[in-house]
């Protein structure tokens, strides 16, 4: 798209909405609430009244997301300029809709093959199903220090492309839910050498590349199609997301058609207006937009210097200085000792990944304690709690968090596990005891207490069973019930899953239909079940049983 003059200060969709809001028009169109009028008899729609006044539809002057010629076209062009894309598309169905549309574009025929990082969000799996595509899953690199999976290496991507030259593209997630990332440029290069696009689910990195303290963006690394949840790490309304494209490898006409297929024909104007505002905030203020949020994170780092029990995850060599400017406790000993190479090089400063260095509180328990003091984290796993900061965070937020952590430090209950702790905690303990010795040997006292296998504790860590899997066909046909049976969880090892199991958050399918359940996966399912984890997709929400294929029945990756 030819670059036009850019007026960053404009927010065309939002401005149009403002104008419409002030107009005394009479509505003879949908939506049926008639700008909230339907509720006036009952005292109004409360705090939703203003949203309803701004809730428009495709009428004269409001433009059409699926055929933009006016304010939406202009707003998307401004977004492309702000995020460094050739073309940007507003998404009103979150990154979910962007991932699905991208896959339907790149895998345009049933049976087309895509190389996919194994621990992808469920929307990617759903995209594969809708496309009737085949996936070759590639293993993400597990980080030996944190135990968390990051992204596949360039070597793995290159090997997969060489093994499957018919692949239509490669899809990876960057950063991960914990804000960890690595350089995407070699992956983009490998893809481009094979003439295929690199697709990046950058749902958690909409702010990337916008400040020197933030990692670079996927687009700047050469990715061809990038999906960002503007609502997650920037300031759009929930479901507001963007899809950015550059270069010649993605068929834009087909992409438009796919977006029209997977998104409502009545897209939400409040969401589109908020995307416009989120972009303008960034475009106008530039890096300055992050000053307050980063100050809030820095205040946390300083405060934690007095609360040594709670540590934050940082890539190796990037341990922050404490408030007094000295390296944090234990780092002198660590510096003298060889440590395993990290699988990640960047950490989003806004994703604060915290752990209890004493090993007393699991991530789940720390989250529970924080919530008891009114601080609500994004998510937790067996070991870590993820606290999301953003350009909207304040030092006041940090003060509350530090207060909560101070209270938790002195809580008597911390000294011992409560009698009714979930069984998961027991298994956690036994593994941690084993690794404490390892930590002492390496002198890595301030590192998180890693377990035997990095795949054990995080629902993010779905590793492929092989570094490069066989092609796995996906489709939509329901599995005939006569081909399946329900078995207790303890009997599912070595069977083939006939349902999708998605721990949430982060929404990464632990199993998809047609995937063999290894002993490791079965053990993890039991830990999750005992810990009362929330799993989407499972027929038994308590995960005491699981649906598997009957032995000797035809098995596929359909739902
Ligand atoms: C990695 C990843 N991709 C995609 C999504 C879907 O994003 P959205 O909620 O914007 O649809 C999520 C949601 O958590 C995610 O974590």
Image (cartoon, helix red, strand yellow):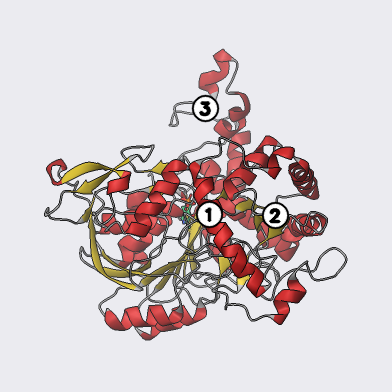
Q: Residue furthest top?
A: 41
How would you rate the neighbour count of disc 3 (Cα within 10 Å): few for under 14, some for 14-19, many for 20 or more?
few
| Residue 315 visible to the viewer | no
Q: Secondary structure at mark 3?
A: loop
* Label 3 CB less than 8 angstroms from ligand 1: no
Q: Which residue is mark 1?
A: 430
Give whichever of 419, 529 is nearer the camera: 419
Task: Please tell me how many numbered marks the rendered image carries.
Answer: 3
- Residue topped by disc 3: 26
For the residues marked 2 and 1, what is the alpha-carbon distance in whole angstroms? 40 Å
Q: What secondary structure is marked by label 2?
A: loop
Mark 2 or mark 1, whichever is nearer to me = 1
Residue at figure coordinates x 44%, y 69% from the top left: 140
Q: Relative to 514, does residue 542 appear above or below in the rendering?
A: above
Q: Specify whether 215 is left or right of 157.
A: right
Q: CA distance from mark 1 to mark 3?
A: 68 Å
Mark positioned earlier in the residue sequence (2 or 1): 2
> CA gap, disc 2 to disc 3?
38 Å
Which disc is residue 391 wearing? 2
When asked about the image quadrant of residue 329, the answer is bottom right
Decide which of 233, 34 is in the foreground and name it.
233
- Mark 1 surroundings: few (<14), some (14-19) or many (≥20) residues within 10 A: few
Q: Residue at x 57, y 17 (%)?
A: 40
Q: Position of residue 117 (x, y in %)?
A: 40, 67
| Residue 493 left/right relative to 455 | left
Indicate which disc, 2 or 3, sits on the residue closer to the N terminus.
3
Question: Is residue 182 rendered to the left or right of residue 7?
Answer: left
Q: Mark 1 or 3 closer to N-term? A: 3
């Amino acid at each position: 798209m030819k670059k036009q003059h850019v007026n960053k200060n404009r927010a065309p969709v939002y401005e149009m909405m403002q104008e419409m809001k002030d107009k005394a028009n009479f509505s003879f169109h949908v939506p049926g609430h008639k700008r909230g009028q339907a509720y006036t008899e009952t005292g109004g729609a409360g705090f939703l009244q203003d949203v309803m006044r701004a809730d428009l539809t495709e009428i004269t002057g409001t433009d059409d997301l699926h055929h933009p010629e006016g304010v939406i076209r202009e707003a998307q062009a401004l977004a492309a300029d702000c995020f460094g894309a050739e073309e940007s598309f507003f998404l009103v169905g979150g990154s979910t809709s962007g991932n699905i549309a991208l896959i339907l574009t790149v895998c345009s025929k049933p049976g087309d093959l895509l190389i996919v990082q194994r621990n992808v969000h469920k929307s990617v799996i759903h995209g594969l199903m809708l496309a009737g595509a085949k996936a070759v899953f590639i293993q993400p690199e597990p980080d030996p220090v944190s135990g968390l999976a990051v992204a596949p290496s360039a070597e793995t991507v290159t090997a997969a492309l060489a093994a499957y030259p018919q692949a239509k593209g490669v899809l990876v997630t960057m950063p991960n839910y914990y804000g960890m990332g690595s350089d995407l440029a070699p992956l983009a290069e490998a893809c481009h050498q094979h003439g295929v696009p690199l697709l990046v689910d950058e749902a958690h990195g909409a702010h990337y590349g916008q400040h020197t303290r933030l990692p670079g963006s996927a687009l700047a690394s050469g990715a061809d199609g990038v999906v960002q949840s503007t609502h997650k790490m920037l300031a759009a309304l929930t479901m507001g997301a963007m899809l950015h494209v550059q270069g010649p490898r993605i068929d834009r006409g087909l992409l438009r058609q796919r977006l029209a297929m997977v998104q409502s024909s009545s897209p939400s104007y409040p969401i589109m207006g908020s995307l416009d505002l989120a972009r303008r905030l960034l475009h106008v203020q530039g890096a300055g937009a992050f000053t307050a949020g980063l100050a809030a994170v820095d205040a946390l780092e300083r405060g934690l210097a007095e609360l040594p029990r709670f540590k934050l995850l940082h890539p190796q060599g990037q341990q922050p200085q404490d408030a007094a400017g000295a390296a944090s406790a234990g780092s002198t000993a660590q510096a003298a000792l060889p440590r395993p190479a990290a699988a990640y090089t960047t950490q989003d400063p806004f994703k604060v990944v915290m752990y209890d260095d004493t090993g007393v509180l699991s991530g789940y328990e720390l989250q529970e304690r924080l919530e008891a003091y009114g601080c609500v984290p994004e998510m937790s796993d067996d070991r870590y709690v993820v606290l999301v900061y953003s350009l909207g965070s304040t030092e006041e937020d940090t003060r509350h968090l530090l207060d909560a952590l101070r209270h938790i430090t002195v809580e008597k209950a911390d000294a011992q596990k409560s009698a009714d702790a979930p069984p998961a905690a027991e298994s956690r303990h036994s593994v941690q005891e084993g690794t404490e010795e390892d930590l002492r040997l390496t002198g890595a006292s301030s590192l998180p207490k890693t377990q035997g296998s990095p795949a054990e504790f995080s629902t993010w860590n779905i590793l492929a069973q092989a570094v490069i899997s066989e092609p796995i066909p996906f489709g939509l046909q329901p599995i005939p019930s006569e081909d399946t049976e329900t078995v207790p969880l303890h009997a599912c090892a070595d069977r083939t899953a006939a349902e999708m199991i998605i721990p949430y958050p982060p929404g990464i399918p632990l199993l998809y239909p047609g995937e063999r359940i290894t002993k490791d996966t079965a053990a993890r399912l039991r830990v999750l079940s005992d810990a009362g984890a929330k799993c989407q997709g499972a027929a038994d929400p308590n995960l005491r049983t699981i649906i598997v294929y009957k032995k000797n029945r035809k098995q596929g990756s359909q739902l």
